[in-house]
Amino acid sequence: MAEVKIKDIVKRYGELQVIHGVNVDIRDGEFVVLVGPSGCGKSTLLRMIAGLEPISDGEMLIDGKVVNKVLPKDRDIAMVFQSYALYPHKTVAENMGFSLKIKGVPKPEIEAKVKQAASVLDLGKLLDRYPRQLSGGQRQRVAMGRAIVRDPRVFLFDEPLSNLDAKLRVAMRVEIKELHQRLKTTIIYVTHDQIEAMTMADKIVVMKDGYVEQIGAPLDLYDNPSNVFVAGFIGSPS
Ligand code: ADP
Ligand code: MG
């Protein structure tokens, strides 16, 4: 678990400024959803938290320590990508253990971690299968399993459900929430889907054009939107 502080963060790509002084405080174990229309800067912000993108200005703190210059591998953060990012020629177990193998973790330890994550995600019977032999939901669980085996302090999700059909999306929302309750890890979850934000978040950060429009609990935003944009965005289902 970890606390994340985003302080006056600015991002420029050359002349183009895409993040304009964003401030967000994320508590230990909190489930925070970054929501906003396509192009508003959600992925950029998430990638800066992961250390995959340099910060132009401002400070990023994890558990009180400035991490602006800390490499991604030393941040104890795992990013869950969409399920199509699985290795097609590796089994479920190999996919899940691969990052540990690269780090040189001994094989028995990898096997134990994979087994434990598989039981959390109900993948125990599927460890020898290949991604093409799995359903979309099972693949998404494997994608989460790859992150869990690393025992990260923070999980980052970037629109993990956007490629799934509507019915599966609903089921996966519930699974991710249950996962959060079991692991109690800090989660920062990006989506452009208002319903996902409303049903999953402890706290929602509404973004627009590289600015934060409002931060609050789902019902706070629903009942007391600070402007017309937030009211329209949270009020209208996608
Ligand atoms: P979101 O995830 O909310 O859809 P992004 O963070 O991907 O938005 O993008 C925010 C803005 O930054 C967009 O205008 C996008 O075109 C721009 N952007 C993203 N990555 C780059 C890049 N590598 N170079 C230049 N502009 C970029
Ligand atoms: Mg994005």
Image: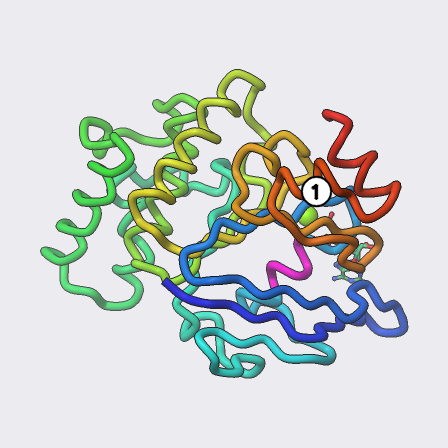
The image quadrant of residue 95 is top left
Label 1 within 8 A of ligand 1 by Cβ: no
Q: Quadrant of the C terminus?
A: top right
Residue furthest to the left in view is 108
Q: Quadrant of the N terminus?
A: bottom left
Q: Main secondary structure of the magenta part?
A: helix
Task: Note whether 135 is above or below 55 in the view shown.
Answer: above
Tell me the SS state at disc 1.
Answer: helix
Q: Which residue shows up at 59% across the image and 47% down it?
A: 33
Q: Which residue is mark 1?
A: 221
Give the total of numbered labels: 1
Q: Which residue shows up at 56% across the image and 19% down it?
A: 165
* Left or right, 4 with reference to 24: left
Task: Note whether 10 is above or below 144 in the view shown.
Answer: below
Task: Note whether 37 is above or below 27 in the view shown.
Answer: above
Q: Which residue shows up at 58% across the image and 65% down it?
A: 25
User: Which amino acid, by three-letter code, is at mark 1?
Assistant: Leu
Image coordinates of residue 186 in percent, x first then y, are 43, 56
> Colour scheme of this structure image?
rainbow
Image coordinates of residue 151 in percent, x first then y, are 30, 58
| 230 drawn magenta | no
Image coordinates of residue 120 in percent, x first then y, are 24, 38
Q: Which residue shows up at 58% across the image and 19% down it?
A: 166
Judge the density around disc 1: few (<14), some (14-19), many (≥20) Cα neighbours within 10 Å.
many
Question: The magenta stretch spans which residues?
Answer: 43-47
Q: In front: 71, or 171? A: 171
Task: Note whether 158 is above or below 142 in the view shown.
Answer: below
